[in-house]
Amino acid sequence: MRAAVIVFPGSNCDRDLAVAFEQAGFQVDMVWHKDAALPEGIDIVGVPGGFSYGDYLRCGAIAAQSPICKAVVAHTERGGYAVGICNGFQVLTETGILPGALLRNAGLKYICKTVGLKVATSDSVFTEGYNAGDVIGIPIAHHDGNYFADDTTLAALKDQDRIAFSYTENPNGSVGDIAGILSENRRVLGMMPHPERAADEGHGGTDGAALFRALSGVFESA
Amino acid sequence: MKARVHVMLKTGVLDPQGEAVRHALGALGFDQVEGVRQGKVIDLDLAEGATEADVTKMCEKLLANTVIERYEIELV
């Protein structure tokens, strides 16, 4: 079981994400943004949180054009698995792998706190460790987490059961209280909250660990 | 050649920064302001032979996120 964690200049959750994968039994390769290819035999790619390229122009916009992101796009187009958290979610929307965009928080403030998340579907490799309707506590830490998608995209996300997580109390103005979404083939997850920051007793909460455990279950048996 | 690109959030996309500026103007007594939208201006110095079509491609690929933003190109 192997995971790749992408490292951009300005990433700051790359190590936390790697530790969460490792604790779930993955061997982790850290992959630098200038690399043009992913290591062979990778089961899943993690795009971490942080402030890639200083968030210049738009959050995730420059990272989305980096050499490694072309490889990540190709990986997902081949049906490969990927998860983007926080800035990683912004990067995945900027590449077009996931629909929509992340706008400035409606209240304009950077928000760093643990929020309630409703598991909106258990039908994905990322969420099958939960029951649909479960409410879990996961930290958010973002300034631009206000998910936006046009009405057609939103209707498609709802009809296809592709909303992975929604906020119990919307902190940032996200349309439909959306905190995380799945790709059409359900193999790519993007979410603003940080499950890797709730994956160890030392974090003060372990509600995010089930996400990584579920992934290890999938790839272990594969 | 120089090009100036204006990038604005699309109509209907909430602009919290513009709203904050509107509130601040109201607090200063400028109660004639009914709406504020904030955007970006990007100036490009272009080599000989560059065309407006090139700038359009730049906007589509990087300078604007057309999911939420619209852009206008001004050749100077």
Image: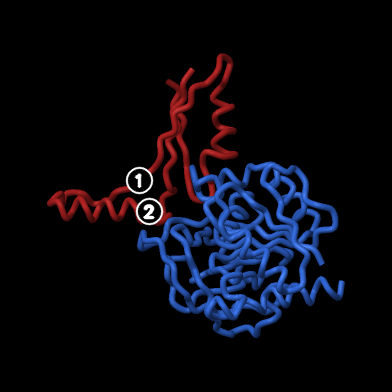
Chain colours: A blue, B red
Q: Position of residue A1 (x, y in %)?
A: 82, 67
In the image, B37 versus A169, the foreground residue is: A169
Real-space CA distance between mark 1 and mark 2, rounded to the nearest whole angstrom: 7 Å
In the image, B19 versus A211, the foreground residue is: A211
| Marks 1 and 2 close (CB-CB < 8 Å) | yes
- Label 2 SS: loop
Q: For residue A171, what is the image quadrant? A: bottom left
Depicted A117 relative to depicted B31: above or below? below
- Tell me the residue at 54%/56% (across/down): A50
State which chain disc 2 sits on: B
Count neighbours of disc 1 (C-alpha within 10 A) and say few if under 14, some if 14 to 19, many if 20 or more.
few
Q: Position of residue A147 (x, y in %)?
A: 50, 62
In the image, B56 versus A3, the foreground residue is: A3
- Label 1 SS: loop
- Tell me the residue at 57%/53% (across/down): A11
Where's the C terminus of chain A, which quadrant? bottom right
Mark on residue B38?
1
For the residue marked with disc 1, what is the amino acid? Gln
State which chain disc 1 sits on: B
For the residue marked with disc 2, what is the amino acid? Asp
Question: Are both tags, 1 and 2, on one chain?
Answer: yes
Residue for badge 2: B15
Q: How many marks?
A: 2
- Tell me the residue at 46%/57% (across/down): A144
